[in-house]
Amino acid sequence: MSVIDIGGSVREGEELDVRAVGNWLIEQGAELSGPVEVTQYSGGASNWTYRLKYENADLILRRPPKGTKAKSAHDMAREYNVQKNLAPFYPVLPEMVALCQDESVIGCDFYVMKRVEGIIPRANLPRNLNFSEAQVCELCINVIDKLIELHQVPYQGTALEQLGKGDGYCRRQVEGWDARYEKAKTLNAPSFKLVRKWLKDNIPADSKTCIIHNDWRFDNIILNPENPTEVIGVLDWEMATLGDPLMDLGSALAYWVEERDSPIFKATRRQPTNLKGMFTRKEVVDYYLQKTGLQTDNWTFYEVFGIFRLAVIAQQIYYRYYHRQTKNPAFKDFWIVIHALHIRALKLIGKQKLEANDVAQKYIVKMKEMLGK
């Protein structure tokens, strides 16, 4: 079995008009020969990602999903330009081919880039890798170091300076994600009332401003097939902006599932952070702060924010499934994960531990009843 990720069958209802795309690419100056083989990558919970394999070209197409979308989300032009402008300073980005903003082609904006061939570490590493504990640790450090490297990019005086609004990022993020949750709530969603109030009451000043990825996960990383602990590509720049690097780290750790975490998080894990050799979340924070020299006496805020933000993202995706705007079966049980994230945030806040644990226990009982267990 190959360790290279080439995608799988295109999901029902997410088919791509390959002929229209091919004709458009030729109009942009691309030279394409032979039939095209189309596959779709499984990680497309937000934007949809396809591989277009021609005899003489290996391309990736990114497009937004169908259905209700957040106003500022799924901006293909922005994602395309972020990568194009960042590439000279951060050489692990795919080469951009062309951006289409003519909806008459396939009904939406999209862009095409060259495929970077490599290993995408998803929930489980490919068995063929047979990583030792030391190699797992090396991979973990390399992924964190690549995030730190991004946070050091000198964006001032470049086109990247227009990415964000500058100071006040933490406050804008709390207020923005709070509003998004209100719009995406469904009848089976938790209120997050205590969590949302706690976040608003504990907003810190920005630690610094830099370029942040805003969706840093192992399954957005490409590894070198010849040296599988080496990062050769970073994907999914939809939410990249100028902001606080500690917010970026807190959001990244929301996906970081450890061996001691609850069965729900283990079952929905998207990256291999449970392996022996991986840092714990605390070790990641300690390593990052030591290497960057940044300091904080309010780390709980960043971690709770990351969890709430992930819950909002999951709720926005589940909202589309709930209202039958997508048929992707992977989204069916997102509401359960959102409740679990709520419990995790309550426990972290620790404002009143007994109260949080009591709320958590009530939710566990309620979820079991709803699941018929």
Image: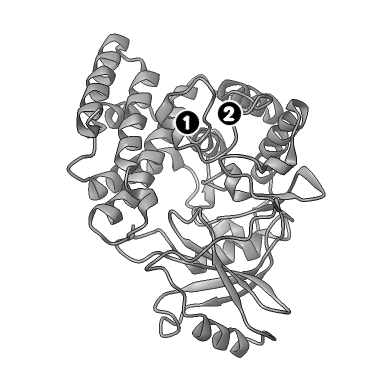
Image marks 2 and 1: residues in contact by CB distance under 8 Å: yes
Local secondary structure at mark 1: helix
Q: Which residue bears the numbered disc 2?
A: 274
Name the disc covering residue 266, or none. 1
Local secondary structure at mark 2: loop
Residue 99 or residue 122, whichever sits in front: 122
Residue depicted at x 73% and y 37% = 142
What's the amino acid at mark 1?
Lys
Picture quadrant of residue 324: bottom left
Disc 2 from disc 1: Cα separation = 8 Å
Q: Judge whether 240 appears above or below 18 on screen.
A: above
Residue 148 or residue 320, whichever sits in front: 320
Residue that sits furthest to the right in the current view: 226
Of label 2 and label 1, which has the lower sequence position?
A: 1
Q: Judge whether 23 appears above or below 205 on screen.
A: below
In this picture, residue 306 sits left or right of residue 71: right
Q: Count the labels in the image.
A: 2
Name the disc covering residue 213, or none. none
Residue that sits furthest to the front in the current view: 1
Q: Residues within 10 Å of mark 2 (few under 14, many from 20)?
A: some
In this picture, residue 366 sits left or right of residue 104: left
Q: Residues within 10 Å of mark 1 (few under 14, many from 20)?
A: some
In this picture, residue 303 sits left or right of residue 362: right
Residue depicted at x 60% and y 74% = 37
What's the amino acid at mark 2?
Asn
Q: Position of residue 351 (x, y in %)?
A: 32, 15
